[in-house]
Image: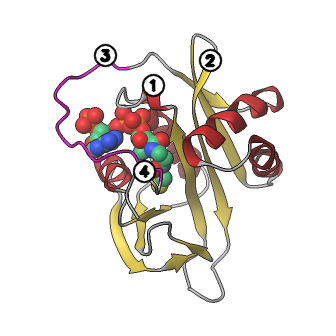
Amino acid sequence: MTDKALRFAPYVPRPPERHAPASAVVAEATGDDVPALAVLQAGARGGSAGDWEDRIRRARSGERSLVVTAKVSGEAVGYANVAFLPEHPADRAPAGSYLTGVTVAPAWRRRGVARLLTLRRMEWAGERDSAVWCLISARNRASLDLHRQLGFVRVLFGASFQGVAFTGGEGWLLRAAPRPS
Ligand SMILES: CC(C)(COP(=O)(O)OP(=O)(O)OC[C@H]1O[C@@H](n2cnc3c(N)ncnc32)[C@H](O)[C@@H]1OP(=O)(O)O)[C@@H](O)C(=O)NCCC(=O)NCCS
């Protein structure tokens, strides 16, 4: 399967041209933000907006979880979440705060939006834990670079962690020190 079919951004470590960073505002997503975020997720990741709405509403109502949105001039251009997960009984991924789901609308990519969404979630994790975790497909080189730049290191390689099978076959469990807020 190609990276396009997997819906990963094409890996371009040195883009021929650069856009100015987006002046995005990152904040906790409200109930009113959910429909637009669901459309964003369905467009970028596939699936129906209705299913995404249910998933995002569930994530928002989780006791130890945070859903964040990035907006430019009031338009939602990015989505992400972080949640506390217990140690997984089968794959032994440890308990902790896990970053999941970061997505930026294609027209707004490579302007630092995912970096802002990730820093915000690392601060949230820093208020609760001494480490922050994420799971990234080995095929998703753009996401691996994004997280490595923010201090994530690879801990374990496998087909699934926290019961989540990797799109593309195999991937990494990564860990970083959370950011102080
Ligand atoms: C991965 C994704 C979230 C990055 O969003 P973004 O806002 O474009 O990322 P940023 O602009 O904050 O990039 C920060 C760094 O990440 C890396 N990066 C981001 N996109 C990249 C790409 N396409 N190729 C190579 N490196 C990339 C770079 O190191 C970049 O720093 P630089 O621009 O100074 O070189 C976005 O491409 C996306 O939504 N992809 C589809 C969903 C997905 O795969 N999510 C991750 C799941 S783990």
Is residue 100 in sight in this rendering? yes
Q: Which mark is residue 75?
A: 2
**Depth check: 133 or 80 in front?**
80
**Depth check: 133 or 15 in front?**
15
Q: Which residue is mark 1?
A: 107
Q: On screen, 175 above or below 31? A: below
- Which numbered disc, 1 or 2, marks the residue closer to the eye? 1
Q: Which mark is residue 58?
A: none
**Disc 3 within 8 angstroms of ligand 1 (CB):** no
Is residue 131 in sight in this rendering? no
List x then y, in percent, for residue 105: 51, 31
- Which numbered disc, 2 or 4, marks the residue closer to the eye? 4
- Which numbered disc, 1 or 3, marks the residue closer to the eye? 1
Residues marked 1 and 2 touching at CB (< 8 Å): no
Q: Secondary structure at mark 4?
A: loop
**Range drawn in magenta:** 7-21
Q: CA distance from mark 1 to mark 2?
A: 12 Å
Q: Which mark is residue 8?
A: 4
Relative placement, left or right, of 160 versus 90 is left
Q: CA distance from mark 2 to mark 3?
A: 18 Å
Q: On screen, 81 above or below 96? A: above
Q: Residues within 10 Å of mark 4 (few under 14, many from 20)?
A: many
Question: Residue sitting at 35 percent across and 63 percent down?
Answer: 139
List x then y, in percent, for residue 179: 44, 45
- Which numbered disc, 3 or 4, marks the residue closer to the eye? 4
Residues marked 4 and 1 touching at CB (< 8 Å): no
Q: Which residue is mark 3?
A: 20
Q: Secondary structure at mark 3?
A: loop
**Along the polypeptide, which appears first: circle 3 or circle 4?**
4
